[in-house]
Amino acid sequence: MVDYKCFSCKKIVSDTYIKKKVRCPYCGSRLIFKPRISTTKVKAA
Ligand SMILES: [Zn+2]
């Protein structure tokens, strides 16, 4: 599951909502980005 973040109100928008409409359900903004929550794994070669 991937959470998106609204660029305007900084609220987390679930991806299920994104699939329906690319719009923030809280403020109606269409500026939604995906915060980088994935841990950067650096392989020790
Ligand atoms: Zn918003």
Image (spheres, rainbow, N blue to C red):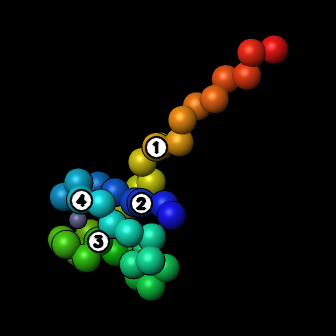
Whether the residue carrying mark 3 lies under 8 Å from ligand 1 is answered with yes
Tell me, yes or no, whether the two marked residues, 3 and 4, touch with CB atoms within 8 Å.
yes
Earlier along the polypeptide chain: callout 3 or callout 1?
A: 3
Whether the residue carrying mark 4 lies under 8 Å from ligand 1 is answered with yes
Earlier along the polypeptide chain: callout 3 or callout 4?
A: 4
Question: Which disc, if any, is residue 17?
Answer: none
The CA distance from mark 3 to mark 2 is 12 Å
Question: Which disc, if any, is residue 37?
Answer: 1
Q: Nearer the viewer, mark 3 or mark 2?
A: 2
Earlier along the polypeptide chain: callout 2 or callout 1?
A: 2
* Residue located beneath label 3 in the image: 24
Earlier along the polypeptide chain: callout 2 or callout 4?
A: 2
Task: For mark 3, give the secondary structure.
Answer: loop
The answer to whether residue 12 is above or below residue 30 is above
Dot 1 crowding, Cα within 10 Å, few <14, some 14–19, many 20+: few
Earlier along the polypeptide chain: callout 4 or callout 1?
A: 4
Task: For mark 1, give the secondary structure.
Answer: loop
Residue type at the position of mark 3: Cys
Q: Nearer the viewer, mark 3 or mark 1?
A: 1
